[in-house]
Amino acid sequence: MLNLVTDASIEPVTLSEMKTFMKVDLTDEESLIEALIISARLSIENYCGIGLITKTYDYIFDDVADVIKIPLPPLQSVDTFVYNDEDYDETEISSSYYKVFSYNKNKGEVILKPNYEYSDAQVGVRGYRIRFNNGYGDNASDVPNLLKTALKLTVAHWFENRESQDIPNEAKRLLQQYKVYNIGLG
């Protein structure tokens, strides 16, 4: 289970950039364009299975394994790793007992070191929580240009076709190289 702790503090594209891209000078549509930028970011993140701008999540899971795959790349960092005892009181697992790895499109893993000893007090149901940060960075300039272009194409499409809720095909073609596929191979 994923819980959003802190959402993105900015968007990858500014209102000014979007208006220039769409060649819109009117000010009476600005609140709509800003809402479309947010919606497009969320749609692209969902479509690709990634984060664009830094966000913080809690990943809550039942059982711990030696390798824990962190959802929603790109993984920036792991803040805390905790387990619950039988009273669901959290105890932090020292970072000396695990290593954080990023690989292939910044997918992330937490790997428990062999010296980690499981406590008898650990529970299975929602027994573990990892707080992590994902996204390309804190600034719009950290987001790859192809992702920003796909976002701009999506906002422009939705602005012109207000009944549309789909990411346009032109944007999907740009997004393909960022899309995370989980094919169950570990």
Image (cartoon, rainbow, N blue to C red):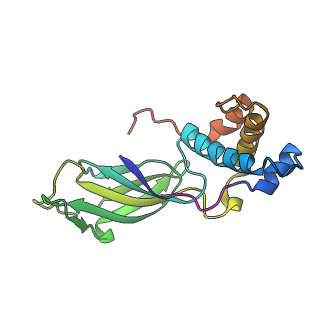
Give the total number of marks visible in the rendering: 0
Residue extending furthest toward the left: 120
Drawn side of residue 74 relative to residue 92, left or right: right
Q: Nearer the viewer, residue 43 or 176?
A: 43
Q: Is residue 57 magenta?
A: no
Q: Nearer the viewer, residue 159 or 113?
A: 159
Tell me which segment is drawn in magenta.
7-11
Secondary structure of the magenta portion, mostly? loop
Q: Nearer the viewer, residue 3 or 96?
A: 3
Q: Is residue 176 in sight in this rendering? A: yes
As drawn, 77 above or below 17: below
Residue extending furthest toward the front: 28
Rendering coords of residue 63 (x, y %)? 23, 48
Question: Which image quarter: residue 151?
Answer: top right
Rendering coords of residue 159 (x, y %)? 76, 37
Question: Which image quarter: residue 14?
Answer: bottom right
* Quarter that holds the C terminus: top left
As drawn, 129 above or below 185: below
Drawn side of residue 36 relative to residue 186, left or right: right
Q: Write the residue at 71% across / 50% down.
A: 34
Rendering coords of residue 179 (x, y %)? 58, 39
Q: Write the residue at 28% across / 63% down.
A: 82
Drawn side of residue 18 relative to residue 68, left or right: right
Q: Is residue 114 in sight in this rendering? A: no
Rendering coords of residue 144 (x, y %)? 69, 52
As drawn, 74 above or below 119: above
Q: Write the residue at 72% across / 50% down.
A: 31
